[in-house]
Image (tube, rainbow, N blue to C red):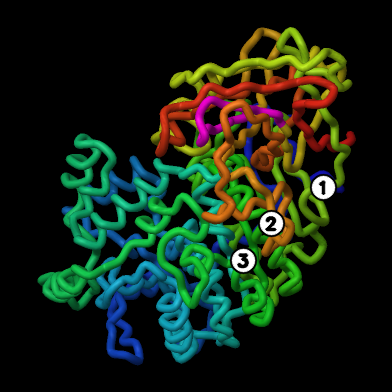
């Protein structure tokens, strides 16, 4: 394993600036001064009109041929502001509103952003099973792109979250012009990504559903999470942006009128307690049917290079990006993975080295250009000499490189022991039991990775995890880098058949302050493991089907392995490793079934509850 060029921990201020951003030979620079944007309808073979924005470099000379990137979105390709002044104000307050196509045009790329059927200004009806339309329409959009006079015949696809999912879907279409995909902060297994440990990420799913309905009905303000947010959005925005020729908004209104029968996949996600709940596609549960893991062979046949980007503060999506890279990497040479200190979409740089979250120094646009230049232009900014995996070690604030994920590590075990301590030797006491009360104050709090705070709000205000049982190691004699996938194995019982267990691993400083390193949870009735996983993972495989649901009987003690989210973190000498166990996390995983359960944690030579962490040697 090599160390990347940038050691942010050695700088005066912490930074997530990329390892490649130090020299002109590895850092692309804009070649155009600006962009042009034109929007119109592209008619599909069945007659459905899809709204598309085309971004081109300003001053592109006639006859110049350039590569193109395509993004298919369910969130609208753009908003219509009430005035240019208000648009400038919104972009200053909400930097995420900046259009990727504007930035890419400066690097000599065309970008085509398309509203999926039943979305934005597009006509048609949205189905809950989004994938077939995204693939067939996407292939036709690529046909349209390569027919344009400015096209060099090579196309890439990219997007964040659901847009990144659509980019991977497009790879299954087998279009020969599609050469590379960059999927960012997205998902590989939709059920597992939205139900980590069988627990619904209710905040995420609720926010997505509210926003989708507001956008589809062209009542954008209704997507705000509070009356104040809704009022603010209504002050700024008229609605979805119509295409250029629709000056009076008549065509947009006609498109919106077709959506009374729209279907919403967030409803399927919210209703699914088991992997096979809800509708199916040819006998496959819908969420599996549209998950990339089901289509790994099709992606492999496409031959596209895939770049996965994830963030440590992005819920379970960090694990999803790791799994996508691990399982689809054999599909083509040039597949890559970057894991940084970011929340969803890299809106903010979040780190224990900061007193407040801040905008990233990492240039996401230039990073995309480096990847796509190699596959769409044959221009190498040093990628051929770089390791395919880069990850950011928090606290050290340093980028590291590795040939694969996770990097080689020694598995070290800490056992839950008497006196609320952690030891590296198994317990010798007779069977002892620690009880976790059904405490509604326990959990990771609102500022966890599952509930990203608003822009500008403090990233850390005291310990993130509160309540529950707490076990502390002795002060560490030397620095310890934890990089990879920790797993907690607990012997537990509870007084409710559908209890939950949450495990938090923390870094406690000598002054008693602490930061949350990683976490994981499990709905105990879905604890049974399976022996035939559909893809390679880094923790126990749990099918979580209806047939696998086995309530934990009162008085029964079960051995359960709780998969914790991947992480790279430096524990400094003198700090303590802390394991916290709770029976509820109401801010992030509201109870859907019985009242919160009281939890028993056993620790003895025959029931050695413990946490295993991967430690990278230094």
Count of number-bearing discs: 3
Q: Which mark is residue 407?
A: 1
Label 2 neighbour load within 10 Å: few <14, some 14-19, many 20+ = many
Label 3 neighbour load within 10 Å: few <14, some 14-19, many 20+ = many
Q: Position of residue 449 (x, y in %)?
A: 52, 37
Observer able to see residue 336:
yes
Q: Residue at x 42, y 74 (%)?
A: 112
Relative to residue 389, is residue 603 depicted above or below?
above
Q: Position of residue 256 (x, y in %)?
A: 18, 69
Return the residue at label 3.
293
Q: Residue at x 21, y 35 (%)?
A: 228
Q: Position of residue 386 (x, y in %)?
A: 79, 59
Left or right of 607: which side holds 198?
left
Helix, strand or loop status at disc 3 = helix
What range of the chain is rendered magenta? 490-504
Relative to residue 300, is residue 43 depicted above or below?
below
Q: Residue at x 50, y 40 (%)?
A: 348
Quarter placement of the C terminus:
top right
Q: Nearer the viewer, mark 3 or mark 2?
A: 3
Point out the tag, 3 or 1, that comes first from the N-terminus: 3
Observer able to see residue 108:
no
Q: Position of residue 402 (x, y in %)?
A: 81, 51
Marks 2 and 1, how far apart at CA: 12 Å
Marks 3 and 2, how far apart at CA: 17 Å
Point out the tag, 2 or 1, that comes first from the N-terminus: 2
Of residue 357 and residue 216, the one placed in the foreground of this image is 216
């Amino acid at each position: 394993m090599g160390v990347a060029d940038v050691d942010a921990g050695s700088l005066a201020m912490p930074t997530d600036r990329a390892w490649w951003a130090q020299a002109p030979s590895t850092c692309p620079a804009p070649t155009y001064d600006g962009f042009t944007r034109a929007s119109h309808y592209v008619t599909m073979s069945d007659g459905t009109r899809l709204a598309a924005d085309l971004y081109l470099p300003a001053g592109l000379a006639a006859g110049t041929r350039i590569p193109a990137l395509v993004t298919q979105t369910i969130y609208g390709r753009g908003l219509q502001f009430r005035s240019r002044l208000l648009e400038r104000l919104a972009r200053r307050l909400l930097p995420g509103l900046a259009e990727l196509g504007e930035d890419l045009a400066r690097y000599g790329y065309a970008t085509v952003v398309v509203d999926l059927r039943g979305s934005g200004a597009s006509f048609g009806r949205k189905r809950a099973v989004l994938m077939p339309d995204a693939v067939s329409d996407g292939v036709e959009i690529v046909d349209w792109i390569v027919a344009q006079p400015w096209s060099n015949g090579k196309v890439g696809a990219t997007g964040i979250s659901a847009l990144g999912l659509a980019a991977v879907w497009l790879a299954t279409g087998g279009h020969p012009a599609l050469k590379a995909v960059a999927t960012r902060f997205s998902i590989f297994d939709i059920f597992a990504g939205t139900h980590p440990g069988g627990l619904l990420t209710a905040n995420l799913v609720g926010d997505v559903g509210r926003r989708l309905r507001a956008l589809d009905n062209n009542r954008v303000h209704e997507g705000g999470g509070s009356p104040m947010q809704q009022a603010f959005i209504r002050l700024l925005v008229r609605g979805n942006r119509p295409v250029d020729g629709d000056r009076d908004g008549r065509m947009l209104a006609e498109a919106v009128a077709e959506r009374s029968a729209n279907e919403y996949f967030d409803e399927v996600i919210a209703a699914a307690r088991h992997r096979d709940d809800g509708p199916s596609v040819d006998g496959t549960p819908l969420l599996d049917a549209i998950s990339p893991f089901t289509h790994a062979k099709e992606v492999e046949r496409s031959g596209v290079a895939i770049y996965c980007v994830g963030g440590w503060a992005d819920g379970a999506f960090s694990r999803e990006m790791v799994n996508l890279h691990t399982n689809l990497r054999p599909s083509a040479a040039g597949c890559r993975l970057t894991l940084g200190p970011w929340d969803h979409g890299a809106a903010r740089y979040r780190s224990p080295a900061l007193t407040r979250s801040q905008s990233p120094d990492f240039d996401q646009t230039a990073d995309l250009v480096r990847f796509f230049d190699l596959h769409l232009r044959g221009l190498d900014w040093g990628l051929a000499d770089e390791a395919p995996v880069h990850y950011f070690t928090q606290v050290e604030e340093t980028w590291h490189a590795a040939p694969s994920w996770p990097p080689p590590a020694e598995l070290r075990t800490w056992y839950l022991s008497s006196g609320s301590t952690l030891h590296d030797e198994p317990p010798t006491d007779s069977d002892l039991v620690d009880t976790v009360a059904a405490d509604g104050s326990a959990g990771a709090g609102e500022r966890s990775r599952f509930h990203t705070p608003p822009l500008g709000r403090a990233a850390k205000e005291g310990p993130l995890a509160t309540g529950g049982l707490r076990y502390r190691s002795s002060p560490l004699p030397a620095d310890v880098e934890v990089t990879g996938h920790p797993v907690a194995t607990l012997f537990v019982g509870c007084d409710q058949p559908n209890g939950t267990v949450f495990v938090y691993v923390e870094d406690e400083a000598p002054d008693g302050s602490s930061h949350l390193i990683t976490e994981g949870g499990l709905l105990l009735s879905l604890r049974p493991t399976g022996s035939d996983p559909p893809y390679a993972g880094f923790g126990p495989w749990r099918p979580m089907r209806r047939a696998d649901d086995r309530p934990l009987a009162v008085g029964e003690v079960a051995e359960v392995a709780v998969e914790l989210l991947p992480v790279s973190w430096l524990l400094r000498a003198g700090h303590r490793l802390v394991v916290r166990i709770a029976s509820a996390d109401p801010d992030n995983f509201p109870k859907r079934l019985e009242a919160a359960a009281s939890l028993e944690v056993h620790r003895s030579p025959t029931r050695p509850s413990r946490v295993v962490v991967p430690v990278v040697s230094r």
